[in-house]
Image (cartoon, rainbow, N blue to C red):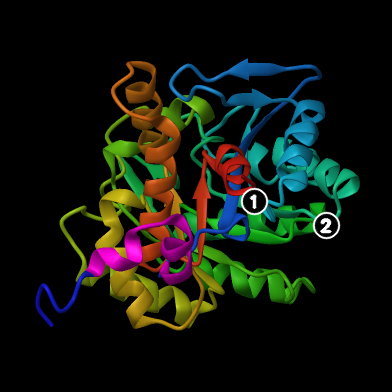
C-alpha cells in the first residue's frame, strides 16, 4: 500500500484512535519499586545522586511502601545498608539484619504487598565485592553457601521472593536447594540472570554504600559487548530453578531484553537502573527535557522490548501518571 491509497495518519488524528490501536500498554501492574532500608528511627537520608530517594529507617520505609501499595504498585525490591561490615558479610544473613527486620515490618503492616529481597554480599562486605575474597580473587564456590544463607534468612523473615544479584556461577541452584530443604519451596527466585558490568550503577553504589574497595566486578558481571552469552546465562539459571529472569540494566540493553523474551517462556524482568533514573532527573533539572514524558517513553520502551515487569526508581511517579 502506497500513499495516497494508504494514509497511516488517519489513525493518529485523535487521542481516542491512538488509544484504540496502541500496541504496547504500560500498567502499574508492571512496576516494582526499589527501596533502601537503614537502621534507626526517623531516619531519612537523601541520596544526592538520586533526587527524590532516601535511605529509610523502618518507620519511613513502611510509610513509603504503603504509598506505593495505595498507588497500585504490587511489589517492592528491598536493599539494606548494614551497621557493620566484615569480609564474610555476616550482617547479610543475621537474624536481626536490616533487611530481615524491614521485611518483617513490611509484611506485618502491608501483608498484601509483595516484598522481594535482594540477595547479595556487596553492601555487607568491607571490601565491597559480591563474593568471598581470596587475595585479589573473588572465590565463586566459597560464596555460594553464604548466598544461600542470606536467601534462607530472608525467607524466615517473611520475604515473598528472593532475587540473587551477585552473578556467581551456580548460585540459583544452591539457593533453590537450600530453600527447598528448609520447607521454603514456595519461595520463588527472581534471578539477575544477565547482569552487565555497567557504568550505569554509580548512583546505586552511593545509595547502598556498595562500591568495591579494589578492582571492579568485570570478572563476574557480564561484558557489555556480549549478547549470546546472555542467552547462555539465562538458560543456566532456568535449569537451576529460577522462576523469573532479570536483565540489568534496561535501556542500554533493550536488544537483550527482546532476544531473551523471544528465547524463553518464563516471565522477564528488566531493571531500569539508578544511572538511567539520574540522567533523566539531571536533564529535567537543567530544563533540557520534559522529565515526565521522557520517563514514560523510557518505561514504555522497556515494556515494548518484552519485559513483563520493570524495576524502576520512577515507580511512584509513573504510577501517578498512569492514574491520570
Judge left or right: residue 1 versus residue 202: left
178 relative to 101 in the view: left or right: left
Q: Secondary structure at mark 2?
A: loop
- In the picture, which quadrant includes the C terminus? top right
Q: Which residues are magenta?
A: 8-22
Name the residue rendered at 36%, 52% in the picture: 250
Q: Is residue 13 magenta?
A: yes
Q: Which mark is residue 93?
A: none
Classify 10 Å Cα crowding around label 1: few (below 14), some (14-19), many (20 and above).
Answer: many
Residue ID for mark 1:
117
- Count neighbours of disc 2 (C-alpha within 10 A) and say few if under 14, some if 14 to 19, many if 20 or more: few
* Mark 1 vs mark 2, CA separation in Å: 15 Å
Quadrant where the image shows the N terminus: bottom left
Please name the residue shown 36% across and 48% down the image: 138
Q: Is 184 within the magenta?
A: no
Q: How many marks?
A: 2
Can residue 97 be seen here? The reply is no
Q: Position of residue 82 (x, y in %)?
A: 64, 29
| Residue that numbered label 2 is attached to | 112
* Residue 58 placement, left or right of 54: right
- Residue 202 lies in quadrant: top left
Amino acid at each position: 500500500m502506497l500513499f495516497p491509497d494508504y494514509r497511516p495518519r488517519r489513525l493518529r488524528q485523535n487521542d481516542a484512535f491512538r488509544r484504540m490501536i496502541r500496541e504496547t500498554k504500560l500498567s502499574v501492574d508492571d512496576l516494582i519499586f526499589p527501596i533502601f532500608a537503614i537502621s534507626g528511627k526517623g531516619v531519612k537520608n537523601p541520596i544526592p545522586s538520586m533526587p527524590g530517594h532516601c535511605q529509610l529507617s523502618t518507620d519511613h520505609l513502611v510509610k513509603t511502601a504503603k504509598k506505593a501499595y495505595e498507588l497500585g504498585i504490587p511489589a517492592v525490591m528491598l536493599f539494606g545498608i548494614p551497621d557493620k561490615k566484615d569480609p564474610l558479610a555476616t550482617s547479610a544473613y543475621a537474624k536481626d539484619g536490616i533487611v530481615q527486620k524491614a521485611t518483617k515490618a513490611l509484611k506485618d503492616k502491608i501483608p498484601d504487598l509483595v516484598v522481594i529481597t535482594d540477595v547479595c554480599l556487596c553492601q555487607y562486605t568491607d571490601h565491597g565485592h559480591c563474593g568471598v575474597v581470596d587475595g585479589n580473587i573473588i572465590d565463586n564456590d566459597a560464596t555460594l553457601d553464604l548466598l544461600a544463607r542470606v536467601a534462607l534468612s530472608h525467607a524466615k523473615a517473611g520475604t515473598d521472593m528472593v532475587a540473587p544479584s551477585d552473578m556467581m556461577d551456580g548460585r540459583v541452584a544452591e539457593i533453590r536447594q537450600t530453600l527447598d530443604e528448609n520447607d521454603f519451596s514456595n519461595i520463588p527466585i527472581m534471578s539477575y540472570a544477565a547482569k552487565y558490568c555497567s557504568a550505569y550503577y554509580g548512583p546505586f553504589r552511593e545509595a547502598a554504600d556498595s562500591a568495591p574497595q579494589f578492582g571492579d566486578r568485570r570478572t563476574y558481571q557480564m561484558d557489555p559487548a556480549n549478547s549470546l552469552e546472555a542467552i547462555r546465562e539465562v538458560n543456566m539459571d532456568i535449569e537451576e530453578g529460577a522462576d523469573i529472569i532479570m536483565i540489568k540494566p534496561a535501556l542500554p540493553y533493550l536488544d537483550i531484553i527482546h532476544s531473551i523474551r523471544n528465547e524463553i517462556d518464563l516471565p522477564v524482568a528488566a531493571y531500569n537502573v539508578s544511572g538511567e533514573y539520574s540522567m533523566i532527573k539531571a536533564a529535567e533539572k537543567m530544563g533540557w527535557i520534559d522529565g515526565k514524558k521522557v520517563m514514560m517513553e523510557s518505561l514504555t520502551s522497556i515494556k515494548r522490548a518484552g519485559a513483563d515487569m520493570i524495576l524502576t526508581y520512577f515507580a511512584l511517579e509513573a504510577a501517578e501518571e498512569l492514574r491520570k
